[in-house]
């Protein structure tokens, strides 16, 4: 039985970003891992948001083999000062992830329009 897998595009050298460098300096590989795990969660979420719920922090702490308080510290560091994530009262998100999904939606719309026009051209040729 095959398992469906998903992927998303990302920079091939994100450690060149000063924000990522600051994260690595402050929290090392754990911080980097938490960042990418959240990015994965944002991509798999229908609304591209992660709720700020205690069970989310617990799940992340378990996945990353650390404690909840450390996860909260890292997430807060990702928000401010690094500005890699955004936050409101209920959620965190990434403007980069949002831009990626806007880009995908635009591409899909353009392909759909091209297909529609191609279908109309084919129909005209058949009628002629």
Image (spheres, helix red, strand yellow):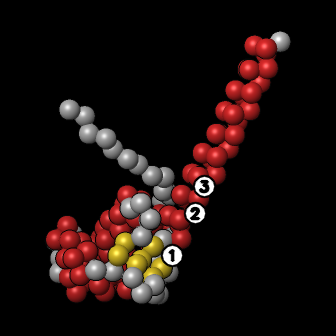
Query: Which quarter of the picture shows residue 48?
Result: bottom left
Q: Is residue 41 left or right of residue 16?
A: left
Percent position of residue 91, x then y? 40, 78
Compared across the picture, whether 7 is left or right of 122 comes to left
Tag 3 secondary structure: helix
Query: Which of the two residues, 104 or 80, is positioned nearer the viewer here?
Result: 104
How packed is label 3: few (under 14 Cα within 10 Å), some, or many (20 or more)? few
Give the residue at x 59% y 52%: 105
Name the disc covering residue 99, or none. Answer: 2
Residue, disc 3: 103
User: In this orientation, which residue lies closer to the viewer: 124 or 90?
Assistant: 124
* Residue at position x 74%, y 27% in the image: 120
Outermost residue toward the front in this view: 127
Kindly tell me whether residue 71 is visible in this rendering: no
Seen in the picture, residue 38 relative to 66 is either above or below; the reply is above
Instruction: Answer whether labels 2 and 3 touch (C-beta < 8 Å).
Output: yes
* Distance from the alpha carbon under mark 2 to that under mark 1: 20 Å
For label 1, the residue is: 18
Q: Residues within 10 Å of mark 2 (few under 14, many from 20)?
A: few
> Please, is residue 80 above or below residue 114 in the view?
below
- Residue 6, label in figure: none
Residues marked 3 and 1 touching at CB (< 8 Å): no
Q: Earlier in the sequence, mark 2 or mark 1?
A: 1
């Amino acid at each position: 039985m095959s398992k469906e897998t998903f992927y998303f595009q990302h920079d091939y050298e994100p450690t060149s970003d000063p924000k990522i460098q600051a994260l690595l300096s402050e929290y090392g590989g754990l911080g980097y891992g938490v960042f990418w795990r959240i990015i994965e969660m944002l991509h798999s979420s229908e609304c591209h948001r992660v709720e700020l719920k205690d069970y989310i922090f617990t799940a992340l702490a378990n996945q990353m083999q650390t404690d909840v308080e450390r996860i909260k510290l890292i997430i807060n560091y990702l928000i401010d000062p690094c500005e890699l994530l955004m936050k409101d009262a209920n959620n965190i998100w990434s403007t980069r992830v949002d831009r990626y999904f806007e880009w995908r939606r635009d591409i899909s719309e353009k392909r759909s329009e091209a297909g529609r026009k191609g279908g109309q051209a084919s129909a005209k040729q058949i009628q002629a």
